[in-house]
Image (tube, rainbow, N blue to C red):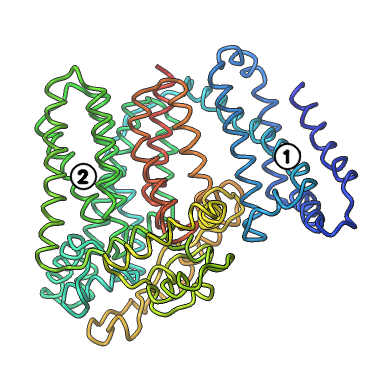
Amino acid sequence: MGNIKCLITSAIAMPIFLSFIDFSVPQSHLMPIIYGLFFEYLSNKAISLYAILGISTYCLFSKIADQHEKKLKYENIWIYCFSSLFGLAFYLSKSYFLLKNWNLAFYSVQSMIFSLSVIFSISFISSIFIKCIYYLLEYMNNPNAKIFYISPKYYFIALFLINLIYLVVFYPGVATYDGIYQILEFYNLKTLSNHLPVLSTIIEGSIFHCGSIIKDNNFGLFLYVFLQSMLQSALFSYAISLVHKLTKNIYLVFFTFLFFLLNPIFQIWGISFVKDTMYYIGFLWFVLIIIRILEFQEIQIIKIGIQLFLSMLLLCSFRNNGIYIIVPTIILLGIFFHKRAAINKMLLINLVGIIAFFGGWTHLLTLNNIPQPVEEALSIPFQQTARLVSQKNLDYNDEQVLMKLFKGNDLRTLYNPEFADPVKFSFEWGKENRNEWKKIYLKYLRLYPDVYLEAFLNQNYGYFYPMSKATDLGSYVIPTNKELKTDIIVLHMNSAFTKEQYIISRIPELYQSIPFISLIYNCSFYTWFVLFLFGLSVISKKNKSIIVGLPIALSLGVCFLSPVDTCIRYMLAIIVTFPIFLSYCISEWKK
């Protein structure tokens, strides 16, 4: 009851703070916005539903809470730290959502005082939610229901059947701009570049070409996505069976199965001709193999070593930054198994092998003069430069240099705080230009670090803000325009199921309108989930969970460096491992 009293006190305190603010003072013009937000949240049906259910669940689990409160010494510390971080991030994100800056919190002394009270209230309420979830997971650790074994082949049949329905309706499959562009690169209709990984272009193009020879371009596209769907279904079924072996928990097995079966994200991306699908498939495979090595140490070293190398090869082939996720994970795994010579040797061979392969391939691209634009990784720094030009008066010479480097464009007109591509693609690629830009970048970093920080936060706030709407949910078409030369690479979707195609394409919108189900498409949900579980693993000293969570946490870091805010496409690797990481952490807590 103490927590409920504190909650009521917090709610009453918020309007009291407002009474000390003079709204007639010009610098306080932001306060009516803040005041309106308080009532906006109270009138939001979805938020009210979450609040009611959260408090009800907390009361329901109060007995469990009393039993575990004394045991959760370090866990409680992390829960309160995490809740405070969430409250701060939530409020700052709202500021960027409304104003594109942090003035909602830092505009004046009055706004700062009031903001602290709001952040405290949000932090306190979120701590109740988190404890509810924690107690629920504790309860799920000891289920009374008996679990029975189901062969992975039955999971595979169910999962592949759903994919097959999508594939029939959308025959020959769907594609993104990048996917079609890679076909053009494969046929030398566009200049080959490592902007879209060359290896993935070769793999995708080769399978497409085989199908085209057998029948036509449509069959080439179908052949690729059909094989991709089979591989996805096989890995999903293996993941479910692994959850069964690890947890012996019917709730977690059933949840994992439904998450893969009824999730429209995987159904549409599973039949998409694009590198991102094979990347998240490879990422899931990599994480599953890490779990196998950790939990089933009496394994066939050669067999698991080959599988590990193939999964790493997929990661490096379909995403240029895959190597940066692999290396730290394998090193940490090697440290954990420092007393197991056989496993350590296998890990070392794989690590050296993948680094040698990646380095050799990069050198081969250089010898063949295939562009490898480093600027791809500079989305955030370029955005920081653009915001600097938009908000500050730079030296005339520096402004002229920047205009030259960005192909004569005025960065003020190009700058979109949440989308880096207009700025990034206007940069004149090349080492000399990059060095010239770097001098200006570092010069003003010392003078205006706050501008650089704000640019980073504005670019990424959607990954932390629960009210942000995700973008790039998946393609339900085959793009057609002159630039993609669709008059040469002719592809056309089945017109017999136009009604069904329309209905399926509206499913994401339906999911996003249903409380709790809408979390499937909420990027911030996955962000906070990863941060909470990974942090809890560290504070609880669960070394195995830390190792499994490391590649997922690193993938989250990749999202923060990406050119698009709140993008499902960049979150796919995190989404696909969500039930696996959750189940593994629960199994570790049980031990």
Disc 1 to disc 2: CB gap under 8 Å: no
Mark 1 Cα within 10 Å, few/some/many (few <14, many 20+)?
some
Mark 2 Cα within 10 Å, few/some/many (few <14, many 20+)?
many
Quadrant of the frame with the C terminus: top left
> Percent position (x, y) of residue 545?
37, 28
Is 529 situated above or below 103? above
Q: Residue at x 53, y 45 (%)?
A: 525
Please count the marks in the image. 2
> Percent position (x, y) of residue 214?
11, 73
Please name the residue that numbered disc 2 is placed on: 311
The answer to which quarter of the image holds residue 66 is: top right
Looking at the picture, which amino acid does disc 2 mark? Ser
How far is mark 1 from mark 2, CA to CA?
A: 46 Å
Please name the residue that numbered disc 1 is placed on: 116
Q: Earlier in the sequence, mark 1 or mark 2?
A: 1
**Relative to 100, is 32 on the left or the right?**
right
Is 145 situated above or below 567? above
Between residue 70 and residue 207, name the one nearer to us: 70
> Percent position (x, y) of residue 385?
47, 63
Between residue 498 and residue 400, name the one nearer to us: 400
Quadrant of the frame with the N terminus: top right
The answer to which quarter of the image holds residue 340 is: top left
Q: Residue at x 53, y 51 (%)?
A: 449
Q: Residue at x 32, y 29 (%)?
A: 149
> Percent position (x, y) of residue 547?
33, 30
**Relative to 341, is 296 on the left or the right?**
right
Looking at the picture, which amino acid does disc 1 mark? Leu
| SS assignment at label 1 | helix
| SS assignment at label 2 | helix
Is 127 situated above or below 358? above
